[in-house]
Amino acid sequence: MGDKNNTSGSSASSQRMDPGWAHVIQVNENNTNDLQCIYCMKVYKGGINRIKQHLAGSYKNVVRCPKCPEDVRNQMQEFIVKKREQKSIMNMERPPKFDDVEVLGLDENEEEEELMLEIGSERRRQVLEVTSTSASKKPKVLPPQSSRGPIDCYFSPKPTVTGKNMRQTTIDENSPAKKELRERACVAITRWMYDVGIAFNAVNYDSFGEMIRAIGNYGREMKPLSFHEVRVQLLNKEVQIINDLLKSHKEEWENYGCTLMCDGWTDRKGRTLINFLANSPKGSVFIKSVDASDESKTAALLASLIEKELMDNGPKK
């Protein structure tokens, strides 16, 4: 099977001039985006350029192939450098248009260079318009959203002068730049979830959406949380918030009373846990959880636990 795949990879590479095709296996004959390295057998998305970065090494976003021969690695490095020099000469003669920018098929440094060249003329035109507006004190019409280039993926929108008022420019939700920004954010979030083993259904919690919106409201300059903030400062703050919430519920119980509820379940460690909650017109609130693993599951046990909670919360409620 391996010889067959290598043969198919070699035949596919003979039809292409790029030397990288001699070192890959095309997973799907109709898809040139997913390619497999013939040395470490890992599959990479992003086309032949991503595989060449994998073989050449020294790219922070691509894992260096540990089994690539040294002569192949040197060949890939020389080819990438030569190709970059050729593109620089071509860009000096003719700046690329937005439609020519290929997101997945470019090397990391090549992508940034083409993006910067593409938006250079557009940004200079916008600067001239703002300067002219300040001089003549006449409002200018903002460029249409379709003229926004891929550089918007790297910078937050800035306030733009429009006559007498200041208005925050925004990127259309359906624009390629906005979709690219969301894609990058989603990849970063899910990669973190995979690293720490967070359950997939965590994204269904309301608090997850609140977190995303809060980060978006702060902006790109927000620094990651520190271990001390999570373990001490913010934990103590959250405990105080919960205590205040529980206090408001207890005040409701004084006025309208409450219903004591309990349910039992078994966790992954095989422990039998009994949760106690209280319900009132304000809503339901968790009170405590009792580990009854070492007790006999009888009506007398449940009655004694319920009686204790009734006394602790006040029978009059």
Image (cartoon, helix red, strand yellow):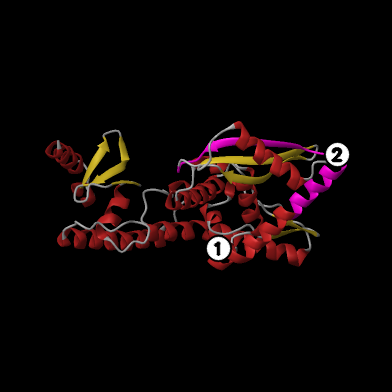
Instruction: Name the residue furthest front.
Output: 300
According to the picture, the residue beneath numbered tag 2 turns out to be 256
Which segment is the magenta one? 244-269
> For the residue labelled by badge 1, is the local secondary structure a helix, a strand or a loop?
loop
Q: Nearer the viewer, mark 1 or mark 2?
A: 2
Q: For residue 301, which quarter of the picture?
A: top right
Q: Specify few, some or many for label 2: CA neighbours under 10 Å numbering under 14, 14-19, or 20 or more.
A: few
> For the residue labelled by badge 2, is the local secondary structure a helix, a strand or a loop?
helix
* Inter-mark Cα distance, 1 to 2: 44 Å
275 to the left or right of 194? right
Residue 213 pos. (x, y %) = 64, 50
Which kind of residue does numbered mark 2 sit on? Tyr
According to the picture, the residue beneath numbered tag 1 turns out to be 224
Vertical order, 183 against 94 (above or below)? above
Residue in front for this viewpoint, 190 or 59:
190
Q: Specify few, some or many for label 1: CA neighbours under 10 Å numbering under 14, 14-19, or 20 or more.
A: few
Residue 153 pos. (x, y %) = 53, 54
